Amino acid sequence: MGAQKKGGARVSDDSEEQSRQRLQAILLADSFTTKFRPVTLERPKVLLPLVNVPMIDYTLAWLESAGIEEVFVFCCAHSTQIIDYLETSEWRTHPNLVVRTIESHKSISAGDALRYIYEQQTETSQIQGDFVLVSGDTVSNMPLADLIQEHRERKKRDEKAIMTMVIKKSKPSLITHQSRLGTDQLFIAVDPLTKQLLHYEEDKVDHARGSVCLDKSLMESNPSVLLYNDMQDCYIDICSPEVLSLFEDNFDYQHLRRHFVKGVLVDDIMGYKIFTHEIGSSYAARVDNFRSYDTVSKDIIQRWTYPYVPDINFGGNRPVKLGRQGIYRACDVVQSRSAVVGASTVVGYGTKIGNGDRILNSVIGNGCSIGSNVVIEGSYIWNNVTIEDGCEIRNAIVCDGVRIRAGAVLEPGVVLSFKVVVGRDFVVPAYSKVSLLQQPMKEDSDEELEYADSSSGTADRLSGLSLEMESKGSELGPDGAGYIWEVCEGAHDEEWKHSVAPIPEDKLAEITQAMDDYDDMEDESVVPTSGELKSDADSINTDVNDPCDDYGYFEKEVEGTFLRAVEEGIKVELGVLEINSLRLSYNMESADCAGAIFYSMMKLAVDTPHSSASELYKTASSIIAKWKGLLGFYVKQTDEQIEVIMKFEEMCQETAKELGPLFAQILHVLYEKDVVQEDAIMRWAEEKAGADEADKVYLQQCETFIQWLKEASEEEDEDDDEEED
């Protein structure tokens, strides 16, 4: 380090050396957790299909497109499967990305993995400088080149700056205190000027009292601190080589965040520093649990992850064709005329769909055979699955080779591991996890490996197991095969929190009541989503961040829910329950719900085939008339009604310009159907009166209607006066 201080020539040499260095990444192909059990007893998580593409392909495709030239894939659990996959994939001969594997069977944590890489580094010098550290379950489209350069420039100025963490806005639920990915609420503190990370804590906010606890020294050494509890840790890190040596020097560092990051923050002796980089429009998320598996899958289908979407070739996947309403279908799918495939659904190659089937908001893999009169909603059916006639599957995950016999029902939250057989007419209870492997007698900790003994041992135990279970009888009916794992003591809440299923109705009722209680609390007792705390101030400035960063995701989810309600003829009451669940998950207000629902209604009108403006008007009017009860639940206040009008105005200007000439007519329909009241229309008009001429287009279009409202109101006032006389 001392050589860097001798003069400018050395800095120039460093700059030339850095420009010659390959951009490198370390990809951890083992999450070192048990959250995906029992599935990961048989296959590593990075090879599990995410919208019919192995997770690791999303990570590698992103790294390659972001300019990374060499990736070291660290393999531990089921390492043979990962290495064999990479050897036979297009990554083996990719012209722009060199993929190398590092194998270790002794590592039981991320810390062990990085220590092992450091030991190899002393012999091979494979890591040439700064590197990107990610997990193989990461989906992102963010650029990396500028961030790496920013990290390097900072390191030149401050040799103690060894890591840059990527973070992104993600509001936690006020009630569950979890992000939309099912992860615990994160609380961090950063320097507002340098973005240095000063404090990192997962779910340590005292929610009951609405307070957080900070060390006094944090304020003594920093005149100003920016606090966040609405950030998501993307687990994408730009690291200097010192990170590896720190793991080697500290054998108690096991977890990347709980141990390493917090250890660096409290270590005053070495003085190393970690910085943050917040991304805005780019996408970045980890598939950490079944909830995030569902969330990220939906984001992929709704194209937030572009260009890593089902209809574009990347990582050697077979693209499928995108049709209307976000339906992706392979070219060789055989589908009965009477079958319905609804919005936000993906159907893979070689799949057959029978008579009278209803498949909505789901992903169907390759080579599946689906019988007649089958209902599949909000589920993930992997490859070569056989589903016989009359089955019902809702919000479940069904792995490769599973057979579901006629009349069977999978309740929400069920996970069926590989080659399980569900017996005829058998009902698999909600949140059940089922495997051909028996549940381990002793529950392993989060830090232990994803497999029971070893890759080969698992395979040996599976061979012939199905026949043995058939002879003993099954927990899935007499003609079934599989063990239903028991929920660990004290883990029942974790089941629904981390499930692909929506929040259950009974839990929704509980947390809705809690939300009402929360609304009654005094404002002073609420922890703000973020803000700046100054050493000479008694309060937090909470006006430093945009509160609507998650609205785009929320709007997409509401649209998907609305389209399902339309297709299935769901009652308004059930639609309200589903949207309330989304409202809690995203921490939204009634006005946000109203805007998103109206957007979904008008988008459906525009997407419905029409040959003229009058036909579009009739369609829009019909949709409003049919679903006014759903929208009406969220527009009980004038401000909420104004939000609908403003959302409509925004759509006409930006995303649905066809509706522009119909603005006044549709506003009149909203008035006639009692969705918006006269007060809301008049207040909107008053606010628009002072706007620039360019912003008065729709106000001018409504002049006749507004004048009619005024005259009608005046006549009513005169009638009232006459009655009083």
Image (cartoon, rainbow, N blue to C red):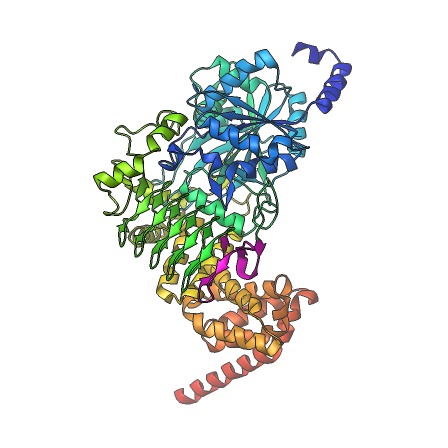
User: Which residue is pictured at 47% across the width and 49% down the height?
Assistant: 367
Q: Position of residue 20 (x, y in %)?
A: 73, 22
Left/right placement of residue 402 relative to residue 340 reads left
Observer-nearest residue: 493 or 192?
Answer: 493
Residue 368 appears in view:
yes
Which residue is at a point 47% across and 48% down the rendered structure image?
365
Question: Quick one: 154 or 26, which is closer to the camera?
Answer: 26
Give the percent coordinates (x, y) of residue 283.
57, 43
Q: Which residues are magenta?
A: 321-347
Inspect the magenta stretch and tell me whether residue 339 lies in it.
Answer: yes
Does 590 appear above or below 680? above
**Residue 66 forms part of the magenta stretch:** no
Q: Is residue 500 left or right of residue 27?
A: left
- Which of the image's four quarters has the N terminus? top right
Asked if 418 appears above or below 647 in the picture, the reply is above
Residue 695 in percent (x, y) is at 66, 65
Give x and y (percent) for residue 224. Answer: 54, 32
Q: Is residue 158 left or right of residue 415?
A: right
Identify the image quadrant of the C terminus.
Answer: bottom left
